[in-house]
Amino acid sequence: LFASVELAPRDPILGLNEQFKADTRSNKVNLGVGVYYDDEGRIPLLESVRKAETALLADAAARSYLPIEGIGSYNQGAQKLLLGADAPQIAEGRVLTVQALGGTGALKIGADFLRSLLPQARVAISNPSWENHRALFERAGFPVETYAYYDAETHGLDFEGMKDSLNALPEQSIVVLHACCHNPTGVDPTLAQWQEIASIVKARNLVPFLDIAYQGFGDGLAQDAAVVRLFANANISMLISSSFSKSFSLYGERVGALTLVTASADEATRVLSQVKRVIRTNYSNPPIHGGSVVSRVLNNPELFQLWEDELGGMRDRIREMRHQLVEKLRDRAPDHDFSFVLTQRGMFSYSGLNAEQVEQLRAEHGIYAVSSGRICVAALNSGNIDYVASAIATVLK
Ligand code: LMR
């Protein structure tokens, strides 16, 4: 039966974790996967999470099945975080949210739903994009192409190219947009540029799928949701995949959500019924624990404030690492200008290192990065940053 099965290549991001684990060097550094580590190099257990879990344990209950769409208070919390607590779209009953298995799970539910709704559509992702976007939408049955996005020369946005690409897409093409902290480049359009993007999306009748996995890691929770609100206020129907993996440091709990903003309450009811069918035929209903923790924090003002402060702490530490990295590279590789790292947002820096240099970092220094040159700045700390900067300077020679 399985004789003809070919060996699949390693996953370009999670495969690095497997390689990293097997590496026996004591000075190894994992800048591959998008995970936040504290200054001691540990994945933090947030105090807000610990408190929520303690409270949950105190009123431990039996675990029945959740509804197909997940925990109601979790879904409401997630949509308020995206659209704002007093969003008119929520008051009008036009927004629906389902709990999902991480941001990836949300993308997959959305992709499967869209595939039955728009079987002829194509999907456009940014060039470059998160490695899994292409694979995920292709597996859902869509042809996937790219729109211009990153300008390697300026280390910034190719906005004219992006607009041209979007304007050239056929109507009802699905456009995957990173609502903040673009993965892998860390380069985001300005709000004024987003206005123009929204106008094109509307005029060309495109279907926006906003992916927001790093809310809170740019400027703050509300600030990072500005694009979602801009699209909603422009009366654009859309899908939004969001994730609490990074913002709650709950990677393994698979805490994500798919939110759809529709044109009317009646539409929302019908859409929810179809999205539930997608979930039911994939994994039936989501797990309880992670969603309960997040829901407790989102719906308790004290815990929410604590969480927001902790998230701010993570954001500040990443900024500090960006500054230090640029400084240390200025000393060690004075011929190279890395100041662009300071304008990139979120966890990542598209470092400009090529695949060969990335491989050299791994082979000779035990430093792991994605072959595109993406490094996770959130994995730098005061103990490894000198080593990393020196190694980068060496491979640049
Ligand atoms: C990343 O881009 O590293 C993260 O989103 C983790 C993942 O699933 O790839």
Image (cartoon, rainbow, N blue to C red):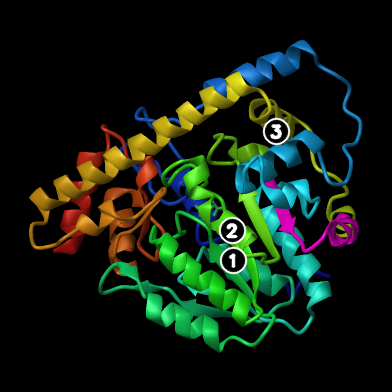
Amino acid of disc 2:
Asp
> Of the residues under marks 3 and 1, which one precedes in the sequence?
1
**C-alpha span from label 2 to label 1:** 10 Å
Residue 187 percent location from the top left of the image: 38, 61
Residue 316 vertical placement versus 329 (above, below): above
| 258 in the magenta segment | yes
Q: Crowdedness of circle 1 by 10 Å Cα count: few (<14), some, many (20+)?
A: many
Label 3 belongs to which residue? 290
Residue at position x 43%, y 68% in the image: 193
- Dot 1 corresponds to which residue? 133
In-image side of 197 versus 91 (left or right): left
Is residue 22 located in the magenta-colored stretch of the structure? Answer: no
Q: Are marks 2 and 1 in contact (CB under 8 Å)?
A: yes
Horizontally, residue 330 falls left or right of residue 352, namely left
Q: Secondary structure at mark 3?
A: helix
Mark with earlier residue (3, 2) = 2
Graded by Cα atoms within 10 Å as few (under 14), some (14 to 19) or many (20 or more), the crowding at tag 2 reads many
Q: Quarter of the image for the C terminus: give it.
A: bottom left
Q: Which residue range is magenta in the image?
A: 255-276
